[in-house]
Image (cartoon, rainbow, N blue to C red):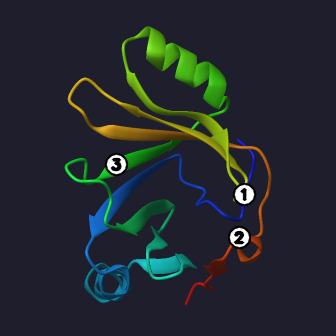
Amino acid sequence: MSANRSLPDATIVPVLAYPDVVEATDWLGVAFGLAVRLRIGEHRAQLTYGDGAVVVAHGLDAPVGHSVLVRVADADAHCAQAAAAGARIVSPPTDYPYGERQYTAEDVAGHRWTFSQTVADSDPSDWGGELVEAP
């Protein structure tokens, strides 16, 4: 898998919804020892713990709430496989300025999954992110 400064190195990244991202990241740091890796305004942040990662996001679509991000080698092939198995494709594979090609699908229970293929190493400052140095 290719490296991209705009995404954590973890293969599977939970995305958790919080009403206040800044408050949540501060609390998660103090309570659980998670470190902020990347801030994206006040609406999204990436946190790490060891070799794991989690994204904290504001106001994900209700009733979906939380989702899972999974890094894959080929988003188009993966999307075709998921669609053939009956997954509902919410958004087709699309290239984003942060160096990822992603699609989103719902599983049989309605949980949202975003599958992400790194297509470029993107500097977060190029698209409005702020890379935070680990403490």
Quadrant of image for the C terminus: bottom right
Which residue corresponds to mark 3?
67
In the image, 120 versus 60, the foreground residue is 60
| Residue type, label 2 | Trp
Q: In this view, does 15 lie to the left or right of 12?
A: left
- In primary-sequence order, the first of circles 1 and 2 is 1
Q: Classify 10 Å Cα crowding around label 1: few (below 14), some (14-19), many (20 and above).
A: some
- In primary-sequence order, the first of circles 3 and 2 is 3
Q: Distance between the residues labelled 3 and 1?
A: 21 Å
* For the residues bearing labels 3 and 1, Cβ distance under 8 angstroms: no
Position of residue 71 measured from the top left corner of the image (x, y, whole percent): 57, 42
Position of residue 34 measured from the top left corner of the image (x, y, whole percent): 40, 77
Q: Residue at x 38, y 67 (%)?
A: 57
Position of residue 101 measured from the top left corner of the image (x, y, whole percent): 66, 42
Q: Which residue is drawn at 25% across and 84% down?
A: 31
Q: In this view, does 124 lie to the left or right of 43?
A: right
Q: Classify 10 Å Cα crowding around label 3: few (below 14), some (14-19), many (20 and above).
A: some
Quadrant of image for the N terminus: top right
Which residue corresponds to mark 1?
97
Position of residue 45 measured from the top left corner of the image (x, y, whole percent): 47, 73
* For the residues bearing labels 1 and 2, Cβ distance under 8 angstroms: yes
Relative vertical location of residue 23 with respect to residue 52 in this rendering, above or below: below
Which residue corresponds to mark 2?
127
Q: How far apart are marks 1 and 2 (CA)?
A: 7 Å
Image depth: mark 3 or mark 1 in front = 1
In the image, 95 versus 34, the foreground residue is 95
